[in-house]
Each structure stands twice: as structure tokens, then as C-alpha cells.
Image (cartoon, rainbow, N blue to C red):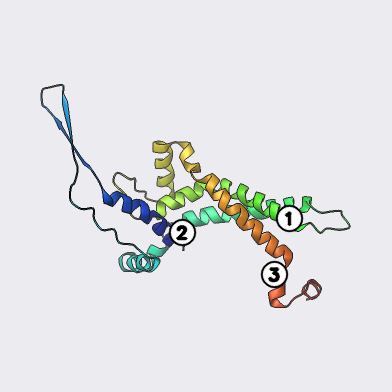
Amino acid sequence: MEMLKIQLQDAGRLAAQQRVVPSVATTLKMGGTRAVLSRSYNTSPAPQVTRVSATQITRELLRTKGVSGLYRGLGATLMRDIPFSVVYFPLFAHLHQLGQRSSEDPSVPFYWSFMSGCLAGSIAAVTVSPCDVVKTRLQSLKKGANEETYNGVVDCIRKILRKEGPGAILKGASCRALVIAPLFGIVQVVYFVGVGEFLLGYTPSNIYST
């Protein structure tokens, strides 16, 4: 799913590159000091850009790369998701415990669960953001003109740091935090309210008794 998501999100950028691409020709006169730069624009109609779907991408990957093609970037995905859980769950548990009314009454207000989920989720998202950048670069199959290609996680990290600087590995961290924060806040509120128990017909008493 991550692989297909990246391809669909990247389709717009690749389509924009196909529309109008000016050709630039540079002629250097031998023996002189002057460079003549001439720019010519393609006057032919812009190529038709076909929309791609997740089904088409899946079929193409299976045809050209087999089942393993759908799992490109698996190592980078695990490198992001496992540390995320390692950071998120203990941090949420600690923040959630701070909202307890008293030692005799360990319950917390629902809004505290929401805020704890939001804060823990955003911190965990920013923490693993470099892994998410690497994962996205590796899973972008179609490259535009002059775009870098990568051979694995280590090669990707090395090229990003060398050519774009340390700040590049945190690109999109704020946007990712804005997505993850409400997501995990809502998850914790749903858990707090007991939607799952209600749907399954359980009550807190018979859950703990079993």
C-alpha cells in the first residue's frame, strides 16, 4: 500500500514534466571566449498525459518485477514504523498517566487522551521523519530528468547528505506531524470511549473477569 501510494502521489509531478519541456542548446565557439545560448521551444501539441490507477501500477509491477516489486523499500518502511512504535507507545503511556486525577481514581478525561495521542504521535513522527524521507526516495520508481537514483538505504542516505545537506532528511516532517497527530489523538479517544468493546458486546467488567 505504501508503494502504490508513493507512485500515485508522484504521478502529478511526472505528468507536469511531460507537458512543456523547453529544449536548450548551448554552442561554444572554439577558440573564443563567447558562449551563445539559444533556446527553442517545442511548438508541437503537449503530449496527452494518461491517468494511472493503483490497479494499473500493481499490474505493471507484477509484470516487470514480480511480487518483490510490490515490496521495494520494505527495509526502509520497517526502519520507519518500528522506531515509531518504540517512541510512541511509551511516550503516550507516560503522558496519559500524567492526566490521572488521583492515585485512587486512575481515570483521565477523554480530552487528555486526545492531547496525549496528538503530542506523542507528532513527536514520534518527527523523530522517524528521516526514515520516511529515505523510504519515499527508494519507492519512487519513475525519476524525472536529472533526478538521482539510489541503490539501497545506505546509498540513499549518503547521496542525500552529500548533495542536499542534513536538512533534506527532515523534509516534510511538519506536514507528517500534522497528519499523524490528529490520527493518533482520534485513535486514543475511540479507545477511551470503548467503541471496540461496544461493537463486540463487551463491558469492562466481563473483559477483566475473562
**Mark 3 or 1, nearer chain start:** 1
Secondary structure category for the residue under label 3: helix
Write down the residue under mark 1.
Answer: 111
Secondary structure category for the residue under label 2: helix
Residue 123 position within the rendered picture, expressed as x and y whole percent measured from the top left: 62, 47
Neighbour tally class for label 1: few under 14, some 14-19, many 20 plus, Cα within 10 Å: some
Q: Identify the residue at image location x=74%, y=53%.
A: 112
Q: Identify the residue at image location x=73%, y=55%.
A: 111
- Label 3 amino acid? Val
Could you give the CA–CA distance between mark 3 and mark 1, rounded to whole angstroms? 16 Å
Residue 9 position within the rendered picture, expressed as x and y whole percent measured from the top left: 41, 56
Write down the residue under mark 3.
Answer: 195
Nearest the camera: 66 or 185? 185
Neighbour tally class for label 3: few under 14, some 14-19, many 20 plus, Cα within 10 Å: few
**Closer to viewer: mark 2 or mark 1:** 1
Residue 81 position within the rendered picture, expressed as x and y whole percent measured from the top left: 55, 56
Q: Is residue 192 above or below residue 154?
A: below
Left or right: 105, with 77 as reference point:
right
Q: Identify the residue at image location x=65%, y=61%.
A: 187
**Mark 3 or 2, nearer chain start:** 2
Q: Identify the residue at image location x=41%, y=52%.
A: 138
Would residue 143 be seen by someone viewing this image from the given angle?
no
- CB-based contact (under 8 Å), mark 3 and mark 2: no
Residue 178 position within the rendered picture, expressed as x and y whole percent measured from the top left: 57, 49
Left or right: 37, with 57 as reference point:
left
Left or right: 68, with 199 as reference point:
left
Q: Quadrant of the C terminus?
A: bottom right
- Label 1 amino acid? Tyr
